[in-house]
Image (cartoon, rainbow, N blue to C red):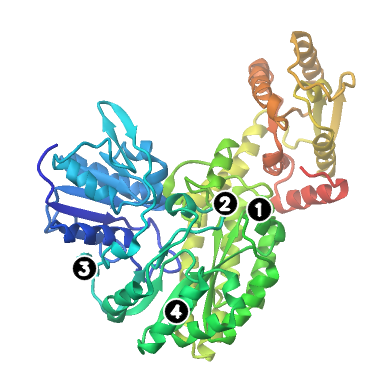
Amino acid sequence: MGRPIRRVLFIEPRNPRPHIFSRVAIPRLGSILLGTILRDQGFEVKVVVEEVHRPDLETLDFNPDLVCISSITPTTPRAHLLGDYYRQQGIPVVLGGPHPSFTPEESLEHADFVVCGEGDEALPELIAALNGEHGFETIGNLCYHDNGTIRKNPWRPFFQDLDSLPIPDYSLIHGWRSGKQAVISIATSRGCPFGCRFCSVILLFGRQFRYNSVDRIMAEIRQNGTQANHIFFCDDNFTADRNRCKELLERIIAENLKIEWSAQVRVEAAKDPELLSLMARSGCFLVYIGLESINPATLKSYKKAQTVEDIRYCVDTFHDHGIKVHGMFIFGSEEDTIQVLRDTVGFSQEIDVDSLQYLILTPIPGTPIYDELQSQDRLLHHDWQYYDGHHAVFVPRYMTPYELQMETLRAMKHFYTWPSVLKRLWRRDWFFAKLKSHGRLHLRRSFKEVKAGYFQQLKEQLFGKARQWRRLTPHRRIRRVGIPEDIWGLTAWESGPREFLLNFLSKLGVEIVREGPETETATAGLADQDQTARLMAEVARLQEKTDIVLLPIWEGIENVRQKAREAQQELSQLLATHRQALALSFNPTLFYNVCMQLGLLFKSRPRLIRRIYFQTLGELGTAV
């Protein structure tokens, strides 16, 4: 296939927009490690990490025979552009990383090959195949084009002998400068036994931990860590095996290595006093902890296996040992309301966490959350650049996407305040004073996006439907709403949601006019032609008495969901000549969002509509 592969270019695309840690470039290890493996096999290698240095690729002094691009979900659009650019030049392109691993068909529209999961063995085997040594069909983890079809080879067993891999060579990075400003990553393990539903680590690296030996880690610290200002141990859970972690930290102390380091840990690490002491003495500056939520129901739904008291104890205990804490909360679970988000801000300030990110739950491909929301048709789009934890890309259960977006921004604004900056300056905590200042300025730029761009799109989605529906009626204000009785039996409305909707409309000040005979709501099937004709006659009579006719369709029972959609299509066709009739679909997961959009037909204040919704929910005790 084409010219022989001798020179390989790796590219790690830059994130599409800045974030809190944008000023600290921490290269991901995948491209550097794979580049080092190939370099040791005799290939000429260059690694471009665009967060470190973004050269003009057209004038780059390196003419590759193969281009390998590593992509996470938000960098996917840039990865695709790069893939298209090099393929147009006739250079084969390989895509790898978390996102292509779970979207190989999409990725192969912009690449010749996709390496899924771990590439330590798969990529060298692919290059050998490109050089004519063997075929592609035996290469585990590989997806590729084959005479117009896509071949997806089985995933290979996870790589076990981590010590056999070379120490990543950072000098391969274009524009890399070691020294006082450099932050390097060191991975001491792969895998994670926990089952967080928003995380793809288990599928990428397995449930069982695989470890480097302490001797191997120490060699990497001496080679790379001592040449940098800071070491980030990038394991998903650095303290998972506490005995091994203690052995490593004891070695760092015994060899008198003067390093500063940070790592990702779970809250239970704070329950081991010996471990905490060793962390502090060995140079631990900061820990990154997934605090996730202060809502016990949310923690349970995330399968996080921790409590709010665990979070409080964890932060206090790390602080007692002089270790800073960066907390990460995730907003938008099925159990979250706006009040939960606001209470989280107060809790964060109360426990005095040093820095944090309020992230929006993001359904990354390959995660259970993605599969669930995709099946429920709750994803807003697949514009991957916004799947970055900072943009609402799905419809939450008890918030609209716009409310989730704005409340998350407001939460960050309430945490990163100028008084909090002054407080850090007073303590002479220069690093976090600078970080909080950067955070505040970053938020200022983010709020400017509210008036345009993505945030405006979410706002338009919220208010646009109400404006569209108002065009169905000539009335300036809609006060009288007709609901035909036969509609309740058409798609088997459950009694709880039906009662909720009627009470909700009543509290909004809407006069409900009902027409037709009472019907039982237990019928789960589609109505026959006589029932449909009867319903249309009811609609015609109601249009003479009301401002608008509402036809609520229920999709709450799985076995009638498709029938409900068919009914909606039929009604939409029949109502084409009835401008004052509105067919609206409801289901349990989107009930709040539909009620909010419906409420905006009568009121222009989302806060009022939200208050009425939860007041109705509290009074009826109905779990909608």
The residue tagged 3 is 175
Tell me the element at label 3. Answer: loop
Q: Distance of mark 4 from mark 3, alpha carbons?
A: 35 Å
Task: Check the picture and name the quadrant holding the C terminus.
Answer: top right
> Label 2, on which residue?
197
3D distance between C-alphas at marks 2 and 4: 31 Å
Q: Which of marks 3 and 1 is nearer the N terminus?
A: 3
| Label 3 crowd (10 A; few <14 / some 14-19 / many >=20) | some
In the displayed structure, 554 sits above or below 464; it is above
Say above or below: 49 vs 428: above
Query: What residue is drawn where x is 28% and y is 51%?
Result: 121
Q: Nearer the viewer, residue 570 or 538?
A: 570
**Front-most of residues 199 and 472:** 199
Q: Distance between the residues labelled 1 and 2?
A: 8 Å
User: Mark 1 or mark 2: which comes first in sequence?
Assistant: 2
SS for tag 2? loop
In x, y percent, where is residue 492? 78, 25
Q: Do the CB atoms of the residues marked 3 and 2 lie less than 8 Å apart?
A: no
Using residue 177 as the reference point, say whether residue 197 is left or right of it: right
Tags 1 and 2 in contact by the CB under 8 Å rule? yes
Question: Sequence order check: which comes first, mark 2 or mark 4?
Answer: 2
Q: Mark 1 points at which residue?
A: 301
Q: How much space separates mark 3 and mark 1, taking CA atoms?
A: 44 Å
Q: What type is the residue that disc 2 sits on?
A: Arg
- The circle drawn on residue 247 is 4
Residue 183, visible in the rendered structure? no
Closer to us: mark 3 or mark 2?
Answer: 2
Question: Which kind of residue does numbered mark 3 sit on?
Answer: Gly
| Mark with earlier residue (1, 4) | 4
Q: Which residue is drawn at 67% across and 43% down?
A: 593
Which of discs 2 and 4 lies nearer the camera? The answer is 4
Name which residue type carries label 4.
Glu
